[in-house]
Image (cartoon, rainbow, N blue to C red):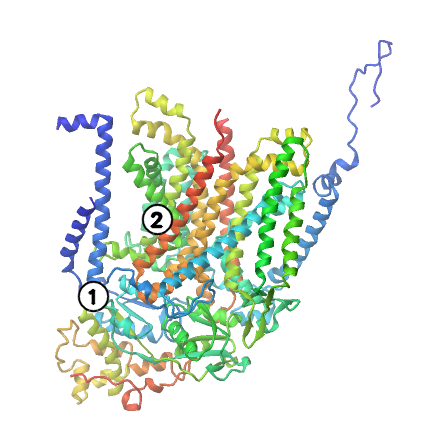
Amino acid sequence: MKSTSWVIAGLTSVLLAGTAGAATLDDVRAKGELTCIVNTGLAGFAAPNDQGVWSGFDIDYCRAVAAAVLGDSGKVGFVPATTAERFTKLRAGEGEILSRNTTWTFSRDVDLQQTFVGVNYYDGQGFMVPASLGVTSATQLDGASVCIQTGTTTELNLAEYFSLNKMKYEPVPIATNAEAQSNYLAGRCDVYTTDASGLAATKAAFDNPNEHVVLPEVVSKEPLGPVVRHGDDQWADIASWTLKAMMVAEELGITSQNAEKMKNSENPEIRRLLGVDELQGVSALGLSPDWAYNIITQVGNYGESFERHLGKSTKLGLSRGINALAKDGGLHYVPPVK
Amino acid sequence: MSYLNSMWRNEQSRGVLIQVFVLTGFFALFSWLIGNVISNFTSLNKGFGFDFLFLPAGYDINQTLIEYTNRSTHLRAAIVGLLNTFLVAAVGVALATLLGFVLGVARLSRNWLISKLAYIYIEFTRNVPVLLHILLWHGIIVNTMPHPRQALTIGEVLFLTNRGLYVPKPIAETGIGLVWLGVVAALFFSVGLARYSRARQRQSGLQWPVFRINLVIWILLPTLAFFLAGQPVSLNLPVLKGFNFRGGIQLPPEFVALTFALAIYTAAFIGEIVRAGIVAVDKGQREAAEAIGLKPGQVMNEVILPQARRIIIPPLTSQYLNLTKNSSLAIAIGYMDIVATLGGITLNQTGREMEAMLMVMGIYLIISLLISALMNWYNSRVRLVGR
Amino acid sequence: MAPQRSQSARGYVAKVSLPALPPPIGTSGLIGWLRQNLFYNLTNSLMTIFTVVLLWLLVSSASGWFVIDAVMQAGSKQECLKIDSGACWAVIGKRIEQFMFGFYPEAERWRPLVCFLLLFVAIGPLLLPSFPARRQMLWFSAIYPVLTGVLLLGGAFGLPPVKTALFGGFMLTLIVGVTGIAASLPLGILLALGRQSKLLAVRTLSVMFIEFMRGVPLITLLFVASTMLNYFLPPGTHFDLLLRVLIMVTFFSAAYIAEVIRGGLQAIPAGQYEAAQSIGLNYWQTTRLVTLPQALKISIPGIVNTFIGLYKDTTLVIVIGLLDPLGIGRAALADANWNGLSNEIYLFVALFFFVSCFAMSRYSLWLEKRLATEHR
C-alpha cells in the first residue's frame, strides 16, 4: 500500500511540475484585483484609518502596482500580517506582493521561495528609551529589558550587537508593533528596538513624544523593500520597475500634478516613460503603454509618496537623508528607462 | 456478479469488503495530499529535512531552564521551549489542583456565603475564554505593578515589579551532601513509620498521629543537618543594578500571568469535578461512617475521598491535559514555550513551517497520548469489579 | 383558641390537635437563617466575617474604577483622563459597531442582524421541544445555513458581495462557533459510530482521527489552516482564509462531539441492541431507528457544553489575524487615541463571553434536569 501511494505521489508531482511558476500577472488580471500583504499597523507605512481605508508608504507602492497592472490604483486588497507570518503568507499565495517594511538579506533572498525586487526605504536598526533614564548611548544598555518584534532581522541583530559588546539583556518578544508599544509604555521594557523609521512612527503616536529619545547608534543595515514569490520573472520585473518608475519620475520631475503636461515634453526619456513614445519591451512584460503614467497620476512619484506619509509635514517628520535620489546625495540610483 | 452479491450478503466477507474499500479510500486521499505537498514543494524548490535543527539559532530567550545562548542550535532552542512548556504545565497543574479542591469543598460548605462565592467564582471564570484570562492577567501585572526602581519589597529579599517577581536563589556550597542525607533519612523514616503503624493498627487497633510525627521529622532532620554542616547554602539576593534586578530568580510577568491564568481557569473546572465527585458518593456511606463514630476528617479521608477519587480522576486528567494544551497560548503574551520557539521564531528564521509544525504537533500528541494511556491504566486499576 | 377537653373522665386524650407553637427565635426567620447558614459555629462565624470584610474591601476599591470614576463618553484616552481617573469606557462606545460587525460595510449591516435574529428561529425547534409548529419549522432550520451564506456573502439576488476579510467582531465569533458545531455534528456522529464499529480498519481510522484532533492544541491547527493548508492542495488552489479556518474548526470539534456521542451510545442498555436485532433490523436500521435517537438525546447537554467550549475557543483566531472581538480590541489599542486601555477592552470582551456562555450553560443544565426526569 505504502509503495503505491509513493508511486501515485511521484506521478502527480511529475504531472504537475510543468505548472510551476504560473503567471501571477494573469491571476491578478483574472481576479481583477491585486492582493498585498502589509503591516498590521505601523504609522506612516501601513495603517487603516477610522473608515478602514489603508494608507501609508508601503500601501502606496501596492497601489502603484495595481495602477500599473490593472490601470486602477483602487483595485487592491490588503492582507495584514505579523512579522512572523509575512513570508509564510506570501509563500502560501495569500497575496502577490509583500510590501511590509521587510529587510533584504542574503538568506531571505536566495531562499528560492521569495525574491526581493528593490529597496524602497534604506533603514537601520535603532533603539528608543524613555528620556528619564538618562541614557545617551546604546552601549549603556547593559542589563536592560528590550522589547522586540519576533520573527524579524532585528531579533538577530540585537543578539549580535549585545554579544559583540559583551552586554546582557532580557529579550521581551512581542508579535506586533502595537503590543510592543503598549508594553514599552507600561514599562515592561526599558528599550524598544526596531528599524529607525519604525521607531519614528511609533514615537509619533505617543501622547508625549518628547519624553522618549532615539539613541544615535544604528546597529544594522536594513534595506527595506517589496518581495514577490520566486519563480515568476515577469511578475518580479513588474514589481521591480513599478518602484523604479516612481523614482525615475521624481528624477525627471514628473509629479501627479504635471504628468499630463509632461506628455508634451521634448525629453525622450519622459516621453518613453509616459508611453508617448514606444518603450521597448513594455508589451512583452504584459503591461499597457500608459503603465507608468497611471502610477504617477494615481499614486504619485517616489518623493511625493515619501512626503505624504513620512516627510517633514507628517507626524513622523523624517528627512530624506540617504533615501534621497542619487543626484541629491542619497542612495536611490535608478537604471535609465530605455 | 452473483459471487460479489453473495459476498455482500455474508456478514464476514462484507466486513472485509468494507474495510478494503475504506482503506483504499484513505490511502488514496493520503497519497493525494502527500503528492500535492511534493509537487508544491518542487515548484517552490523547497526541501524537506530536519538538518535546520542543528544550525545556530541566533536569537536569545529570556527564560531558560538549561544553558542556552544565541550560538546554540535551533534544536536546543526547541528544548528550552519544551522545558518552559513543561514548567508552566507543572506549576499550573499544581496550583489548579490546590485551588480546585478548595473550590470544590467550598461549594459544598454549609456556610452559605462561602458556597455562593465559590459558585460565583466558578461561573465567572469558566465562562470567559482562557485567552482573555491570560491577556487580562498580563495586562494587570504589566500595567499596575511598579517599575523596578519603585519595586514593592518584602524585607529587601522578595521584590515585586512589572518585570516580574524576584526571589532569592539558593546556592549550594560544600557540605550540602549532609543536608541531602538528612532529607533521604527523613524519607526512609517516614515510610518505615507509616508501614509499622499500619501493621500495628491492624493488630491492636491503636493509632499513632503518623502525619504529625512525620512532619516533625521532615523539618527536624534536614534542619539539623543544615546546621551541622555549617549552613552550606548561601542565598543569591536580587539587587537593583542599572536597569533591572540582578541575581536571584526572576519569574517574568509572562510566566506568572500564564501560570496564574491557566491555574485559575482550570481550577473552576476542577472545582466542579470535585464537587460532583463528592456528591456522587452514596449518602449512606457518610451516614454509616458517622454512625460507627469516625471523626469528620476521617469520614472525608477514609470513606468519602477514596470513593470520590474514582469518579474524579478521569475528568481531572483531561483537565490537566487541557491546561497543557492551553499553555500553547503563551504566544499571545510572548512567553517562550515550544510553540513560540520551534513553532514561532525558528519556523520564521528558517522557513521550515512543515517540519516545525509537524514536530510541535507531534510533541503535543505524544504528551496527550502518554497521559491518556496513564489514565486508562489507572482506570482499569481502580475499576469496581462487578459482582 | 383554647383546647377543649372532653367532659367525661374517659381519659386525657385531646379531641383536637394543638396548634404548633412558633419555632424558637433562633431557628427561623432571618436570624435563624443567618445562624444556620453563616454563624453555626465559631470557625464559620470567623470565616463569614473575614469574607464579608474582604468582599467589602474588594467592592469598594473596584467600584471606584469601574463605575464612580469611570468615563462613558470621550473622544480619546487623553480626554478621558481629563474628565476622571477611572475606567475609560468611552473606547467601547466609540468602537461598538466594530466590536459587533468588524469591518462589514455599514450600509449592509442589516444582513448579519437578520441572520442573527433568524438564528433563533432556526435553532428554536431543535432545542425547545415546545416550539410552535416544530415539525414544519425544522425545514427552515435545514435551509438556514444556505440562507445565511447568501445573506452574508451577497453576490446574489441583488445583494452586493462582501469579502470575508471584512467579517469581524462578535459576528465572526458566531459564524465560526455556529458553523463549527453545525457542520461537525454529522461528522462527529460518523466518527462515533466508526469508533464503535466492529471493523478494525474503520475503528482504527476513527480512533486515529479523534485522538489526533484532541491531542494537539487548536492554535496549531489554526496555524496549519492559515499557512500550510495550501501545500496539501493542488498547486495554484487558493481558497478563503475564513473557509479554511471553518474546515479546521469543524474537524476539531467533530472529534470532541464524537466522544460525547460515543458516551451516549455506550449508555444505551445492551437490551436495546439485542431487541432491535431480534426483530430483524440490520446495522443501519438499528442505528437510525433505535440507538442513535436515544444516544443523541442523552448527548444534547454534552453537545451544548462542547459548543460553549468551541465558542470560547473562537478567540484563538486572533493568532492568525482574523478580527474577532479581541482582534478588534487590539486594533483599537493600536490607535494612538486609545493606546493603553487594554483592561477596559479585555473586560468588555470578557463580559460579552460571560453573558452568552452563562446563558448557554444554564440552558444545558435545564435540559439535563428535564431529560433526567424523563428517564425516571
Classify the position of the C terminus of chain A by image quarter.
Answer: bottom left
Q: Is residue C160 visible?
A: no
Q: Is C182 displayed left or right of B128 in the figure?
A: left
Classed neighbour count for the residue bearing mark 2: other residues with Cα under 10 Å, few (<14), some (14–19), many (≥20): some
Residue bearing mark 2 = C148
Residue at 13% across, 82% down: A277
Viewer-proximal residue, C374 or B364? B364
Kindly identify which chain the residue marked by label 1 belongs to.
A
Vertical order, C205 against C267 (above or below): below
Q: Position of residue C348 (x, y in %)?
A: 52, 58
Question: Residue A24, which numbered label?
Answer: 1
Classify the position of the N terminus of chain A by image quarter.
Answer: top left
Q: Position of residue C96 (x, y in %)?
A: 47, 60
Q: Are both tags, 2 and 1, on one chain?
A: no
Q: Quadrant of residue B231?
A: bottom right
Q: Position of residue C330 (x, y in %)?
A: 45, 64
Is disc 2 placed on a helix, strand or loop? helix
Q: Is A248 displayed left or right of B348 in the figure?
A: left
Question: Residue B32, which numbered label?
Answer: none
* Image depth: mark 2 or mark 1 in front: 1
Residue at 36% across, 49% down: C249
Q: Amino acid at mark 2?
A: Thr
Q: Is A43 displayed left or right of A331 in the figure?
A: right
Q: Amino acid at mark 1?
A: Thr
Viewer-proximal residue, B227 or B17? B227
Kindly identify which chain the residue marked by label 2 belongs to.
C
Residue at 23% across, 85% down: A261
Vertical order, B189 against B336 (above or below): above
Is disc 1 placed on a helix, strand or loop? helix
Q: Quadrant of residue C59?
A: bottom right
Residue at 30% across, 62% down: B352
